[in-house]
Image (tube, coloured by chain):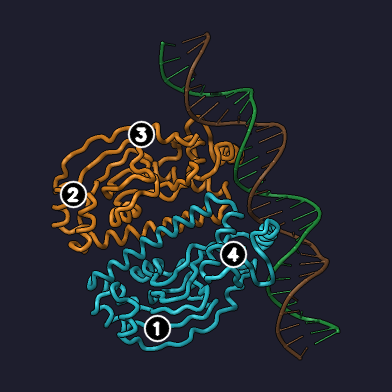
Chain colours: A orange, B cyan, C green, D brown
Amino acid sequence: MRTALLIKNTPIANFMQLDIEFLHSRFNGLFELNLLKELGQVGTYMEIEEGHVLMRPGAYIRSVPIILSGSIKILRSDTDGREALLYYLGGMDSCAMSLTCCLNRRKSEITAVAEEKTKLISVPVEKVEEWVSKYSSWKQFVFATYQKRFDDLLGAIDQIAFRKLDERLLSLLQRKSKQCGCSVFTVTHEEIAGELATSREVISRLLKQLEKLGRVKLSRNKIELM
Amino acid sequence: MRTALLIKNTPIANFMQLDIEFLHSRFNGLFELNLLKELGQVGTYMEIEEGHVLMRPGAYIRSVPIILSGSIKILRSDTDGREALLYYLGGMDSCAMSLTCCLNRRKSEITAVAEEKTKLISVPVEKVEEWVSKYSSWKQFVFATYQKRFDDLLGAIDQIAFRKLDERLLSLLQRKSKQCGCSVFTVTHEEIAGELATSREVISRLLKQLEKLGRVKLSRNKIELM
DNA sequence: GAGGCTCTGTGATAATTATCACTTACTGCC
DNA sequence: GGCAGTAAGTGATAATTATCACAGAGCCTC
């Protein structure tokens, strides 16, 4: 069963207006003042619950997110339901896929899921394009986003192409631990299997192996990294 | 031995000045006239022999190529010499990695090899950046390049993460056949193994299997796709 | 036509990963 | 406490991929 994500499709909470002080404190230095003003007018603040699916393959994308806090994981899905983790989006990150899709009016080719409670600003597609010409800081931001995601994808390919599953598993656990800022985190073997494009049994076994080596401690829905 | 590529490092031939008529015929509609003029002044025309290595991991990149004809394959290498094909660059394509590196003065993280005799224009790094602000057609070109390479990488991940080696092999052969425009092409099992991040023996066996199925015909340095 | 080089074929075997079919464990809820 | 539902553990077995160790084939050169 790879549809575990789908049933956690909890609603988005806390829409609110963006005031300029808030934006200024967050984006000062990154975006110019006029851009911040426009962002305040047309951007939408959102809080996304953990597990919420922000984007699915085939869906049209009408906005680009800028993550303020929390994290979003981006997965690639193939036709028969298998998945692979591409990368995480964290603070001040944005999504290259949504940029591409917005700028070209294309459908999403990835899945985006909130890994934890996440706060973000959503920018409507028309502005994404308009601002590229209008604000040099936005143009820089868009370039930087492409570059970061490109690097992330190269990293994903390194893992998938060159590393064995046990190594990939360990580095995924380390990333998750880093992300939540503590050594113990909530995750099922099934979910990990999805991110590493393999099956649950395989992950269960590898985890048991790691536990025997004293690298992790396992319990239901939870993994502690030693 | 994965260094087969290195020994084919034949020199670049035929530097020449670019005249405006030539550029116009190639880029008409894509680039505006003033950009074409500048391109003629600072761009360098090159013909690259098959097998020439244009770029290696760790090298600084001082120019961005625009491919006029032929094709370049882009490989990712890991620390212990293994390689994986990322994508091909063909007509009017450019390389996102070199853009990223140029714009950030970073070192290359990929290998680029001419798959066949290739003609290209090389644009110096300073201009790449300058033109993004100066010419909207260049900005569009850079965006489009990022987007295309991003898609290519997603495609590479699909193959590596979700497909079995025999399928990947077959689709690689099909791509090569398409590239050279004919059903028979020159390649060694070793080279294919490098592109698919596996070993020569594995490829030899899979090819034999395909031959038994009547999908290919094998001979030394050559594969014919049925 | 005899070496020498690279490329290819292949047996034997191991390591890794995948699948099937269960069992067992944990949690929440009535 | 009993039941339902999800998560995790595990044996058996298969499929896939990797490695090692050669043998033979094709081709170039002297």
Where B8 falls versus A204 (above or below)? below
Are labels 4 and 2 assigned to the same chain?
no
Is the residue under label 4 in contact with that under label 1 (CB below 8 Å)? no
Of helix, strand and loop, which one carries label 2? helix
The residue pinned by badge 4 equals B194
* Residue depth check, mark 3 versus mark 2: number of the one nearer the observer: 3
Q: Name the residue under label 1.
A: B45
Quadrant assignment, res A145: bottom left
Residue B147 visible in the snapshot: yes
Write down the residue under mark 3. A9
User: What is the three-letter code of the residue carrying label 2?
Assistant: Leu
Horizontal relation, residue A40 to residue B75: left or right: left
Q: How far apart are marks 3 and 2 (CA)?
A: 28 Å
Foreground disc of the pair 1, 4? 1
Secondary structure beneath dot 3 equals loop
**Could you confirm whether marks 3 and 4 are on the same chain?**
no
Give SS at disc 1: strand
Residue B190 is situated, as x and y percent measured from the top left of the image, at 64, 67
Where is residue B65 shown, x and y percent of the image? 40, 75
Q: Distance between the residues labelled 3 and 4?
A: 42 Å
Residue B180 lies, with reference to residue C24, above or below; the image says below
Q: Answer with left or right where residue A125 lies relative to residue D29.
A: left
Q: How crowded is mark 4: few (under 14 residues within 10 Å), some or many (20 or more)?
A: many
Q: Which residue is drawn at 44% across and 50% down?
A: A86
Kindly identify which chain the residue marked by label 4 belongs to.
B
- The residue to which callout 2 is attached is A23
Circle nearer the N terminus (3, 2): 3
Question: Mark 2 or 1, which is nearer the eye?
Answer: 1
Which residue does the image show at 22% across and 43% down from the upper left?
A: A45
Q: Which amino acid does label 1 sit on?
A: Tyr
